[in-house]
Amino acid sequence: MVAQALKDSGDVSGVLDAPEVMINGIIFTSKWCHICKIYRPPRCRHCYSCDVCVEDLDHHCFFLKKCIGKRNHRFFYTLLFSLTVYFLLMLSFCTIFLVKNPNALFLSTITTFILATISLLASVPLFFFFAFHTYLIADGLTTYEQILRLYKSDKNPFHKGCWRNFTALLFGNQLSRHL
């Protein structure tokens, strides 16, 4: 809301000094977004596809045409989990049908085999994508931080421990404090 008001008005007179935020003993200086005309809090990035700054930006999902960030990361993770389980169940049921009904009609067998193949082709990449995001959440990283290797030599200040990272993602506050 504040970001949109500053973006629309172009008035930056109230924003003179870059605010500093301390997280787990590490001081972050907020960066200025020239497009949105705001100081971005830590982990906030500008998405050039959506043309907006997104808090805790993980990535821009081209399949969903949305940025995955603080407000919708739990729903994205739940979607990955649900789709993975769905396709694995579909593959299991198709396999059970093919094994238990060897004398089924030719059309039923072919249809079931096609469904099983589609389920297998969809579930394998989805499973690895879900596993990758599970790893990122457990380490307290975003996709951008992993790609840029921001915390390889230093301690990740956003890592709260595996259990706390998951509970913060799945049950934490989604509302933005800064934007």
Image (spheres, rainbow, N blue to C red):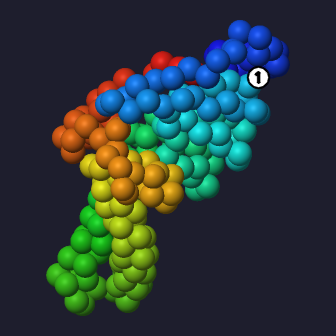
Instruction: Return the residue nearer the eye: 99 or 86.
Output: 86
Task: Specify whether 165 is left or right of 22.
Answer: left
Look at 76% across and 33% down and name the residue there.
Answer: 35
Quadrant that contains the C terminus: top right
Quadrant that contains the N terminus: top right
> How many labels sit on residues?
1
Point out residue 105 in the picture as x, y percentages from the top left corner.
34, 86
Q: Is residue 10 shown above or below 159?
A: above
Task: Specify whether 59 is left or right of 12.
Answer: left
Point out residue 89 in the picture as x, y percentages from the top left corner.
27, 64
Amino acid, disc 1? Lys
Q: Is residue 68 shown above or below 13?
A: below
Q: Quadrant of residue 33?
A: top right
* Residue 130 visible in the picture: no
Instruction: Return the residue nearer the eye: 91 or 34.
Output: 34
Point out residue 76 in the picture as x, y percentages from the top left corner.
43, 45
Q: Quadrant of residue 173?
A: top left
Q: Is residue 110 shown above or below 22?
A: below
Point out residue 66 in the picture as x, y percentages from the top left corner.
60, 44
Look at 41% across and 70% down and name the residue there.
Answer: 125
The residue that label 1 is drawn on is 7
Instruction: Return the residue nearer the eye: 168 or 161.
Output: 161
Q: Is residue 115 shown above or below 158?
A: below
Instruction: Assign a secondary structure to mark 1.
Output: helix
Q: Residues within 10 Å of mark 1 (few under 14, many from 20)?
A: some
List the single residue furthest toward the top: 14
Look at 48% across and 31% down and name the residue there.
Answer: 28
Look at 35% across and 38% down and name the residue there.
Answer: 158
* Residue 122 visible in the picture: yes
